[in-house]
Amino acid sequence: MYVSVDLLEFIPSNRGKGLTLIYKGYTYGHMHSRTRWYCSKKTKGCQAKLSTTADGKLLQVIEGHHNHSPPTLYRTTDGKVIRV
C-alpha cells in the first residue's frame, strides 16, 4: 500500500504522456502549464486544484476539498506507483 505524506511526488502518467502529481494521497494532472494542477477526478466534478513553482515546490493550494476519497495507490518493488 502507498503511504501518503505532505510532500509532492511527480510520477509518469499512466498514459505515458506528461506527469501525474501525488499530494496527500490524491493524484493531479497538469493544466496548461506544469505549475497549475487539477484533481484527476475533475471530470467527476472534483474542484481541487493547486499550483507549484517551476522547480516543483508547492506554491498554493487553490481549492483543497475533494468530493471523493483518495485513490488506492500501490508502490511496486522497483518504485513505480500504480493505481489499484
Image (spheres, rainbow, N blue to C red):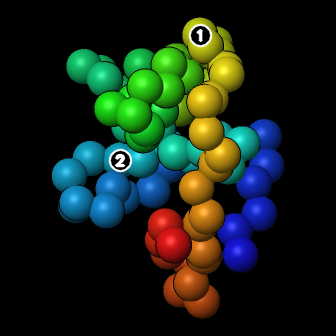
Mark before the other along the chain sequence, 2 or 1: 2
According to the picture, the residue beneath numbered tag 1 turns out to be 62
Q: Quadrant of residue 43?
A: top left
Q: From the viewer's perspective, is 80 left or right of 67?
A: left
Judging depth in this view, the residue of 69 and 48 nearest the camera is: 69
Residue at (39%, 34%) from the top-left corner?
44
Q: What is the total number of numbered labels drawn onto the structure image? A: 2
According to the picture, the residue beneath numbered tag 2 turns out to be 19
Amino acid type at mark 1 = Ile
Residue at (42%, 40%) from the top-left corner?
40
Residue at (41%, 47%) from the top-left corner?
20
Across and down, in percent, residue 42 comes to 39, 30
Judging depth in this view, the residue of 62 and 19 nearest the camera is: 62
Across and down, in percent, residue 69 comes to 66, 46
- Mark 1 secondary-structure assignment: strand
Across and down, in percent, residue 66 comes to 62, 29
